[in-house]
């Protein structure tokens, strides 16, 4: 009987010792787990912050000093090649109205003196007298800016520019005749200031001319340099 009680006492003592051991192990492991969780993150671990912080220098933007005037008046000079009557200097004036940034209307008038024709230079006879050798024209044309852009003189100094096509109709007075004229060509506009621009212009003036009793279509090329003013 005493042996039985002794065995039961040992079994109960063993259970209490095991329980006490588990409690002690749990209490000892808790600080280690907390310390592991508080360890700093590895430098190689991915983070949301960028690895390189860019240092972007902000530049001050200055608005272009271009006024909003729609009218443009100017003068030009250059060379006018009258078919079979030589190439001579030409002068004229223009008046333009810019409907939009892309389209504009232009009134133009010019005058040039012509030389003797090939027939006259051969010494047969004079076709025109001195008054009839003056060629005058005027026309109304529609222009379209195809390549607006900028021309940079330095890294901080730029000018507005534009290539444009232009075509229109008008009249040419030559050899005591008034001739319906079609003109077309292209040009380049260089805006130097908010009120002044320079132009390079090339045109073909096409009209029918009847001098020797036979009407023929003539192509008369013009190249000019001009200066215009906005208002």
Image: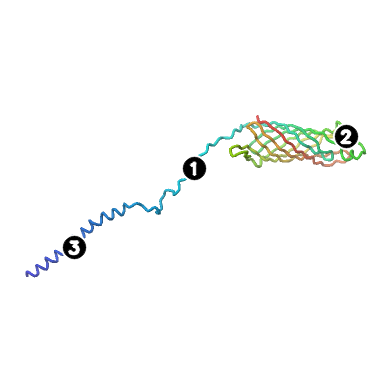
Q: Secondary structure at mark 2?
A: loop
C-beta proximity under 8 Å, tags 2 and 3 = no
Residue under numbered circle 2: 128
Residue at 45% x, 48% y: name it.
52
Position in image of residue 197 (x %, y %): 67, 34
Residue under numbered circle 1: 56
Say which quadrant the C terminus sits in. top right
Q: Looking at the picture, tell me which residue is in the foreground, 53 or 115.
A: 53
Q: Secondary structure at mark 1?
A: loop
Task: State which mark lies toward you, 2 or 3.
Answer: 3
Tell me the quarter of the picture where residue 192 sits.
Answer: top right
Q: Give the alpha-carbon distance from disc 2 to disc 3, as whole Å.
A: 135 Å
Q: Looking at the picture, tell me which residue is in the foreground, 44 or 164.
A: 44
Q: Secondary structure at mark 3?
A: helix
Position in image of residue 74 (x %, y %): 70, 31
In this view, the residue farthest toward the left is: 1
Residue at 50% x, 39% y: name it.
58
C-beta proximity under 8 Å, tags 2 and 1 = no
In this view, the residue farthest toward the right is: 124
Say which quadrant the N terminus sits in. bottom left
Residue under numbered circle 3: 18
Mark 3: few/some/many CA within 10 Å (<14, 14-19, 20+): few
Q: Give the alpha-carbon distance from disc 1 to disc 3, as whole Å.
A: 67 Å
Position in image of residue 151 (x %, y %): 63, 39
Tell me the quarter of the picture where residue 230 sits.
Answer: top right
Task: State which mark lies toward you, 2 or 1.
Answer: 1
**Lower position in the chain sequence, tag 2 or tag 1:** 1
Q: Give the alpha-carbon distance from disc 2 to disc 1, as whole Å.
A: 73 Å
């Amino acid at each position: 009987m005493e042996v039985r009680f002794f065995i039961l006492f040992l079994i109960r003592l063993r259970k209490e010792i095991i329980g006490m051991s588990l409690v002690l192990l749990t209490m000892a492991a808790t600080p280690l787990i907390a310390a592991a969780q508080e360890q700093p993150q590895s430098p190689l671990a991915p983070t949301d912050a960028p690895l390189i912080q860019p240092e972007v220098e902000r530049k001050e933007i200055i608005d272009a000093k271009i006024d909003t005037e729609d009218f443009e008046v100017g003068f030009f000079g250059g060379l006018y090649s009258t078919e079979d009557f030589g190439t001579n200097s030409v002068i004229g004036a223009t008046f333009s109205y810019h409907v939009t940034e892309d389209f504009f209307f232009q009134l133009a008038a010019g005058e040039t003196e012509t030389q003797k024709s090939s027939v006259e230079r051969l010494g047969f006879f004079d076709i025109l007298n001195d008054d009839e050798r003056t060629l005058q024209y005027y026309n109304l044309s529609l222009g379209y800016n195809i390549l607006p852009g900028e021309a940079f003189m330095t890294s901080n100094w730029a000018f507005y520019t534009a290539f444009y096509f232009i075509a229109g109709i008008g009249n040419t007075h030559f050899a005591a005749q008034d001739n319906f004229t079609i003109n077309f060509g292209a040009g380049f506009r260089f805006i130097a200031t908010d009120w002044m621009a320079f132009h390079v212009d090339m045109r073909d003036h096409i009209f029918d001319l009847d001098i020797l009793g036979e009407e023929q279509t003539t192509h008369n090329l013009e190249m000019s340099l001009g200066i215009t003013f906005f208002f």
